[in-house]
């Protein structure tokens, strides 16, 4: 249950990240903090786990949510800039294209924000302390 809740939270966080980026026209790195917290909280509430595996799960899903939010924002903005239907852009996304988009839009400050998301996803996913 923790995985499913975390996956939904990561998707919701990614959608909010993309929406705010599209509306403001700026990539706000602090959104990663929110995604990390949201995913960690969802994994904690649904998973009720005390093992370190829950923290690793939360961290991985938080990072995935941040990356997905980043990708969604880039894809939507590219579709608008090039006046191409959104569906046409999504159908052309291959792993190589996704990697290229993520690499092109990456900034060094993202390491800090993604790191915070990883930490929060880990920390908030575990009920109480860890029992390794």
Image (cartoon, helix red, strand yellow):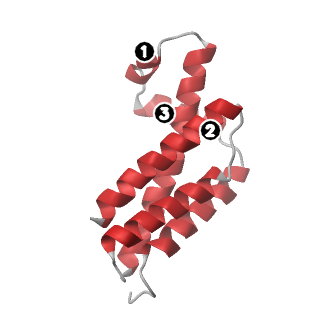
Closest to the observer: 99 or 40? 40
Query: Which residue corresponds to mark 2?
Result: 20
Which residue corresponds to the image point at 50% horizontal and 44% vertical from the top-left? 14
Q: Dot 1: what SS?
A: helix
- Is residue 116 at least partly visible in the picture? yes
Residue drawn at x 37%, y 70% as measured from the top left: 45
Q: How many marks?
A: 3
Q: Name the residue under label 1.
A: 88
Residue 6 lies, in percent from the top left, at: 38, 59
Q: Give the distance between the C-alpha atoms of the residues marked 3 and 2, in whole angstroms.
A: 20 Å
Count neighbours of disc 1 (C-alpha within 10 A) and say few if under 14, some if 14 to 19, many if 20 or more. few
Mark found first going from the N terminus, 3 or 2: 2
Check whether the beta carbons of the residues at disc 3 and disc 2 lie within 8 A of each other.
no
Mark nearer the N terminus (1 vs 3):
1
State the image quarter where residue 112 is shown.
bottom right
Instruction: Count residues near mark 3 (Cα–Cα under 10 Å), then give few for <14, some for 14-19, many for 20+.
Output: some
Badge nearest the viewer, 2 or 1? 2
Decide if residue 68 is in sight here. no
Relative to residue 128, is residue 17 depicted above or below? Answer: above
Kindly report which numbered mark, 3 or 2, lies closer to the viewer in this rendering: 2
Q: Is residue 77 left or right of residue 124?
A: right
Counting from the top left corner in percent of width and height, residue 23 is at 65, 31
């Amino acid at each position: 249950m923790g995985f499913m809740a975390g996956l939904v939270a990561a998707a919701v966080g990614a959608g909010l990240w993309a929406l705010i980026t599209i509306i403001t026209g700026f990539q706000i790195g602090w959104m990663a903090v929110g995604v990390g917290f949201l995913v960690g909280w969802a994994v904690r509430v649904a998973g009720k786990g005390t093992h370190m595996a829950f923290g690793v799960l939360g961290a991985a899903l938080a990072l995935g949510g941040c990356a997905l939010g980043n990708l969604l924002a880039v894809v939507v903005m590219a579709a608008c800039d090039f006046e191409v239907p959104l569906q046409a852009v999504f159908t052309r996304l291959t792993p190589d294209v996704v990697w290229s988009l993520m690499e092109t839009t990456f900034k060094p400050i993202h390491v800090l924000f993604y790191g915070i998301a990883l930490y929060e996803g880990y920390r908030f996913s575990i009920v109480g302390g860890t029992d390794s």
